[in-house]
């Protein structure tokens, strides 16, 4: 049964999508069957893996809102796309339509469990399911946390890094109490780290103090190649395997696999 990791932080620009794409690619490179579920209406995880969102006919919007196709409810099997350049990697794509899903689900029963129900039918087909969450703490994020087995929290090594984390941890706590008691924190991941800067070192120390033992050993260094790779629709290990970014995410994938 798949381990479902939610990559979550309501603060934008922390490396959430970059982590989702590259962690999934590194797990797939280790021949772990991996699915990326794009739950962000910006659909950057979709395009970052080389999928043209303009050519997508069915997406996570159709799954979450349980649309019918030929008298049958749309499932993740109907929408998932294989990544051409990686044998063990699939994507459940998103489109901007997903932004409207929260409004459509407002008066729906068990609306917080739509994603959990959708993933249950395919869990045995994968070793890992990586969910790229939206940059908010709305209904879609609650769906993600309810479906996940663990949460990976990217934290950028910049000023205001810890801002909003208390709210996220409170949301995780509420989900644990009311919707998903098995949810655990996989770890906090330090991103955009620059060892030359005192600020990066101070933020890293603050995060390690805040999460006390639940911080990944690897840090994701600030790396131009990581920023360039999505524009080519490739994960970093295929764009530049010799880069620091590739080395960092390969190490992260190894840490996660070793923690099993």
Image: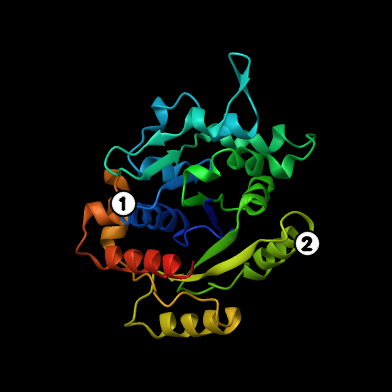
Q: Position of residue 126 (x, y in %)?
A: 47, 46
Q: State which tag comes first along the sequence, 1 or 2.
A: 2
Q: Do labels 1 and 2 touch, CB within 8 Å? A: no
Q: Position of residue 88 (x, y in %)?
A: 35, 45
Residue at position x 47%, y 81% in the image: 204
Q: Judge by depth and name the residue closer to the eye, 181 or 162.
A: 181
Q: Position of residue 165 (x, y in %)?
A: 62, 69
Residue at position x 64%, y 35% in the image: 101
Which residue bears the numbered disc 2? 177
Give the total of numbered labels. Answer: 2
Which residue bears the numbered disc 1? 235
Q: Residues within 10 Å of mark 1 (few under 14, many from 20)?
A: many
Residue at the top extreme of this rendering:
70
> Dot 1: what SS?
loop
> Hey, which quadrant is residue 73 in on the image?
top right
Give the Cα distance between marks 1 and 2.
36 Å
**Residue 77, which numbered label?**
none
Colour scheme of the rendered structure: rainbow
Residue 59 in view, yes or no:
no
> Dot 2: what SS?
helix
Q: Judge by depth and name the residue closer to the eye, 158 or 50.
A: 50
Q: Is residue 11 above or below residue 206?
A: above
Residue 50 in view, yes or no:
yes
């Amino acid at each position: 049964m798949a381990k479902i990791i939610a990559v979550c932080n309501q603060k934008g620009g922390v490396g959430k999508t970059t982590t989702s794409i590259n962690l999934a690619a590194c797990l797939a490179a280790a021949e772990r069957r991996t699915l990326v579920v794009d739950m962000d209406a910006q659909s950057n995880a979709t395009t970052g893996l080389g999928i043209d969102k303009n050519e997508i006919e069915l997406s996570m919007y159709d799954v979450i809102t349980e649309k019918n196709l030929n008298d049958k409810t749309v499932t993740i099997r109907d929408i998932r796309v294989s990544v051409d350049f990686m044998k063990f990697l699939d994507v459940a794509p998103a489109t901007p339509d997903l932004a409207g899903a929260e409004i459509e689900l407002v008066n729906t029963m068990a609306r917080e469990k739509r994603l959990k129900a959708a993933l249950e039918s395919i869990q045995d087909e994968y070793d890992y399911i990586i969910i790229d969450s939206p940059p908010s703490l709305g209904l879609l994020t609650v769906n993600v946390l309810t479906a996940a087995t663990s949460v990976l929290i990217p934290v950028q090594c910049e000023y205001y890094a810890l801002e909003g984390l208390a709210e996220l941890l409170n949301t995780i706590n509420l989900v644990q109490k009311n919707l998903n008691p098995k949810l655990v924190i996989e770890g906090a991941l330090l991103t955009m780290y620059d060892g030359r800067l005192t600020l990066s070192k101070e933020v890293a120390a603050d995060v390690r103090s805040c999460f006390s033992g639940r911080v990944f050993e690897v840090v994701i260094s600030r790396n131009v190649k990581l920023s360039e790779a999505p524009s080519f629709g490739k994960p970093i290990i295929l764009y530049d395997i010799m880069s620091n970014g590739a080395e960092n995410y390969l190490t992260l994938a190894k840490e996660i696999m070793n923690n099993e």
